[in-house]
Amino acid sequence: MAFDIDVLRVKKGDNVDLSSVDTRGTPEWDGDDKDEGKAALPALNERLETLQELLYAQGTERLLVVIQAMDAGGKDGTVRHVFEGVNPTGVRVASFKRPTEAELAHDYLWRVHSQVPGDGEITIFNRSHYEDVLVVRVAELVPEDRWERRFDHIVNFEEMLVDEGTTIIKIFLHISKDEQKERLQERLDRPEKNWKFEEGDLGPRAQWDEYQKAFEDVLERTSTDDAPWYIVPADRKWYRNIAVSEIVIQTLERLDMSFPPPEEGLDKIVIPD
Ligand code: AMP
Ligand code: MG
């Protein structure tokens, strides 16, 4: 049975209520259990590897994958598992941290625009310009009249990228507050995960509801036909990996790519001894 990614897509005009989306849900997955879910990933990795090679070889399409989530939402793990096996030459991850002084001395899209994919490339945004209407809004880093206008800037910016030849998909990994607690606790308990623990992450956790509201506004106001958001239930990592793989793969398949035509007369060429 085909996995219909449209079920996860936020349509224009949708009213998004994240509390009604089950973070442990497994929409469109009709396998039995976790083991079967995990076993399905390698075949998806292979399909993505083939499509990425085609994208790179054809050298005319560009794919931007934006990933957003609460802390411990699984952004890093998703990148690692979904893109396992792709050729690193054509795939890049851009991670957006707290802006540097130089970045703060420019408009908020400046650092973002310079990282978008070029011809034949896939770029994954681990966090993105959406932080500028999420953390910036909830932590009140700029006044409301400034972040409020950013929704329109962002829709227009992405429309420009799409018009000029970039394909955009945006993924919100939706975890529950309980699941976040477990994952943060694991970062405290397991020495090899200690490096990921930041006490600062407890601030956003305390403002969970404000963040969920900010995410709902993002999903409602910036999901367009050309640059759609997908809400991926992400408490179950195996499901998250399958769903994100399907979204990326099916988006690439729709590009209907082909290898560039070979140089003339290849059949007559003899490789000298
Ligand atoms: P991590 O993804 O765990 O490396 O954390 C990156 C941190 O940078 C998070 O706390 C984000 O909220 C923060 N961050 C990313 N972009 C911005 C931004 N535009 N303004 C303020 N903080 C940001
Ligand atoms: Mg972090």
Image (cartoon, rainbow, N blue to C red):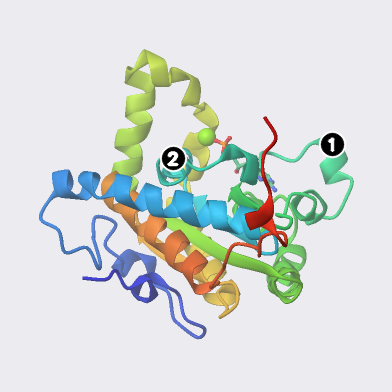
Residue 3 lies left or right of residue 217; in this view the side is left
The residue tagged 1 is 101
Q: Where residue 176 sits: x, y (%)?
A: 32, 51
Identify the residue shown where x is 74% and y is 55%. 118
Identify the residue shown where x is 37% and y is 21%. 188
Q: Amino acid at mark 2?
A: Glu
Quadrant of the rendered image containing residue 226 = bottom right
Quadrant, the N terminus: bottom left
Quadrant of the rendered image containing residue 258 = bottom right
Q: Amino acid at mark 1?
A: Glu
Between discs 2 and 1, the one toward the N terminus: 2
- Which of these two is toward me, 166 or 216? 166
Q: Where residue 158 sits: x, y (%)?
A: 70, 69
Quadrant, the C terminus: top right
Q: Where residue 119 sits: x, y (%)?
A: 72, 58
Question: Is 140 placed above or below 231 here?
Answer: above
- Ligand 1 closer than 8 Å to the CB at disc 2? no
Is residue 94 in view?
no
Of helix, strand and loop, which one carries label 2? loop
Residue 20 lies left or right of residue 15; in this view the side is left
Q: Mark number for residue 84?
A: 2
